[in-house]
Image (spheres, coloured by chain):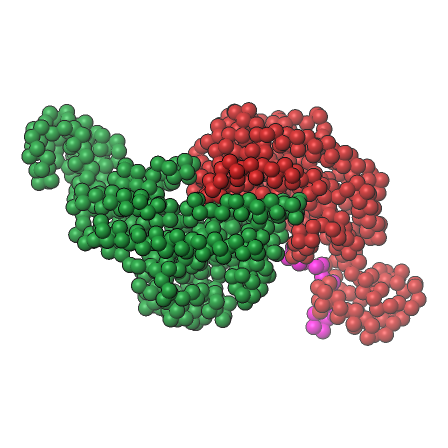
Chain colours: A red, B green
Amino acid sequence: MNKYFIELGDEGVVKYKTIEKHIKKLIDSNKIKDGEKLPSIRKLAEFLKVNNITIINTYKKLQSEGYAFQKMGSGTYAKRREINRNFRKEYSNVLKKISSNGCNEYLDFTGEMPNGDFFPVRSFKNVIDEVLERDGARALIYQEILGYSGLRESISSVFWNDRIDSDDILIVSGAQQGIDIISKAIINTNDSVVIEKPTYSGALSVFKWRRADIIDIPMDKDGIDIDRFEKILKKSNIKCYYTMSYFQNPTGISCSYEKKMKILNLAEIYDFYIIEDDYLSELIYDRNIKYNSYKSMDTNDRVIYIKSFSKIFLPGIRLGYLIPPKRFRESIQNCKVNTDIATSSLMQRALDLYIRKGFWREYINKLNFVYAKRYEYTKKCLFKYLKDKVVFEDPGGGLHFYIEILKSMPVDSIAIFKYAMKKNVLITPGTLFYKDPLKGSKYFRLSFSQVEEKDIDRGINIVADIVDYFG
Amino acid sequence: MNKYFIELGDEGVVKYKTIEKHIKKLIDSNKIKDGEKLPSIRKLAEFLKVNNITIINTYKKLQSEGYAFQKMGSGTYAKRREINRNFRKEYSNVLKKISSNGCNEYLDFTGEMPNGDFFPVRSFKNVIDEVLERDGARALIYQEILGYSGLRESISSVFWNDRIDSDDILIVSGAQQGIDIISKAIINTNDSVVIEKPTYSGALSVFKWRRADIIDIPMDKDGIDIDRFEKILKKSNIKCYYTMSYFQNPTGISCSYEKKMKILNLAEIYDFYIIEDDYLSELIYDRNIKYNSYKSMDTNDRVIYIKSFSKIFLPGIRLGYLIPPKRFRESIQNCKVNTDIATSSLMQRALDLYIRKGFWREYINKLNFVYAKRYEYTKKCLFKYLKDKVVFEDPGGGLHFYIEILKSMPVDSIAIFKYAMKKNVLITPGTLFYKDPLKGSKYFRLSFSQVEEKDIDRGINIVADIVDYFG
């Protein structure tokens, strides 16, 4: 044990604060393992040539911060701070702070949505005004359950070339509500749900709430591990499979056409449904990537399609839509009513007009231009500062990179998160995306949508310094 | 059985349509009971002096419409059309039609919200414009989980005289979402929930979804039957009690101050929570009614308060708020995130400005003026056309009357609904408001908010004609 303290002992007079910081770092980097005994007070005091009381105080401080615990009559032991509970709280507190302050303090690499600077505030204001002039009070009463018919028609014609009937579309208040409603409508207690490992934490939470039996299957580079999937299908009844088919959150992986065909086929054979959360497919930078949603390939009505307008457009208007298979249409509608009756009629009408006027296409083109550049720049900075320390794949689109810290680097993503936050840089640790959070401890997600180029360089540099600090 | 057909037989030549209509009326009014055998084809044809084929066709038609079923080799039997399933579908289809057509065709006595004619479209448009000018993109990003701080401060100061801290308020997308979120946060499978008999169907559905054990307790004239309530508390663990404290939906009853005090006391003794859905307390016409919410009387943090801005203000903006007890604050926030992440930031900011500018008070005063008059007028028409056929209480506020059809009248509310709909008049049958729908068959709700005075007279006259037709 004392080997860890050699560098401290070498420095001569050691300060209380230095010892504390040093031990925290050892625990955060997992060099001192969870449950490992710390040196006895007397021995460490002797070794560092400090007073016993200094070590006693250090150990007390560590205990109070959850880094250590005492066994009566036996000594003090290291404690890996509980990853999930404490961390999630800390994380969500920071995000709350950001959302109320408007991101000024932090370099925020957590946000998965377009930056406010690009929002079409002016043109959106104009369509709202035009809608209120045109529709008056009708824009402010309850909307029909399916959603405003004009918007459904726009979606049908602009996004689906009329291949989906507007009456097969259900407007919802964002993708998260879509997942919640679908779960209520089709998942019962103990039904089995297949998710990808890792996956979007918001979906994971909903399935947990429904008390589903959650089976997570690792990702290959072209989508979920299909052999593993088929093995599970052979022995268990699966109700549904939740997937983000393009630029999966967090891995950035897009499922190949071939794999999608195979999975659609499996869905028919083994009688399960595919919940396709199509959240970012508008942002394709790599021209080799072709867009084919499960829904567009679905000949057996096996796909429940979810589209969010928050991720790609205006998060604050809370709009999205579902295309459920016919057999679930009624139950999903009932769940929508019981969840919040209807989605804001004014926002639906405004979005409809926005699409009809062609503003939507313009906006998406602009985003693609800006973010493709920023994507390349982020990649450049990752190579510049983190080469030989991390690995990552090229998603070829979307708003983030998913980064694996090499095993040889003795730091995990919770530690990076904590140390980076002190320097006003925010990243998302991989632990959020796994059923078993520990599985994500060597990964983090870096989203570039909220950070300008000059700050991307600075932010990644700071992250690299932290990795080095533990190295 | 043939006695029911005497009046038909007396008329001489009987037409196919007449026989069909006559039998339907007998079944709808419960004179021919559910499962009762209809006369044999031969006998009825003989009695009515018509061809066998006429009766065969009549019975076929009745079957196809769900009024009868056949037992092989035994004959044809009456079938009371399944109250819940078919009726709910029919009801919701009509409401869908209304919401898309803007209420033109029907005299709509079902709506529980202000009429669009009174909507402050102009001033609301102005506040939206002002918010977008002032806040720009910030009005269109995700709002913090609790909701826009400005709106929470307005609610705290204008509606609660600062007696509730703005950080104790959670903005939601309407009261229905409030009920859904609370249920997710505090009700587990098989937890017991007490509801009033009858109660709001939207709450009933949510509790059913949560698989709660639902206990319904009848209403007295001053609120729930408290003796019955206490008996149940003595023998069962109750998790929560859902109540609308003013102008309860559908009975119109307001809970007395004394009863509220008693129930708050019981909540502390028997450790349960009160979900107070305060949906219409702004509309008090009877000056003897004083406003005291459970929340304002609550000294033990036992009340989860829900306020909707849809019922009283603009349904289409989907806004409301919760005030949960401190111990549930975190779990309720988590449920909000998992349900739809956040409520529309633009709508929150617009409502905030609307309240700050004093428009809210003006609007509520106007509504009170208009609806107090309409309330009195509706009462007058009810006396004019339905005296001696129905009874009802004076709620003294709100937007509807709950009407009991006297036992001596052989018609039920489903029949009134169906026959009135054919004449383009819509009422809400009581069956929607009970755990056991049949309990509501002699009640209907008449909401006057969507119908102008001249049409109120005409509509109630039509309903009275239907009651007479069955008399």
Residue drawn at x 45%, y 43% as measured from the top left: A142
The span shown in magenta is A71-87
Q: x, y percentage for residue A418?
A: 75, 55
Residue A304 seen in render: no
Q: x, y percentage for residue A423?
A: 79, 54
Q: x, y percentage for residue A259?
A: 61, 29
Q: Is residue A264 above or below residue A91?
A: above
A338 and B42: which is toward the camera? A338
Q: Is residue B412 left or right of residue B241?
A: left
Residue B132 seen in render: yes
Q: x, y percentage for residue B18?
A: 16, 32
Quadrant assignment, res B469: top left
Residue drawn at x 38%, y 53% as measured from the top left: B371
B18 and B195: which is toward the camera? B18
Q: Is residue B83 left or right of residue B347?
A: left
Residue drawn at x 27%, y 37% as measured from the top left: B423
Q: Is residue A17 above or below residue B209?
A: below
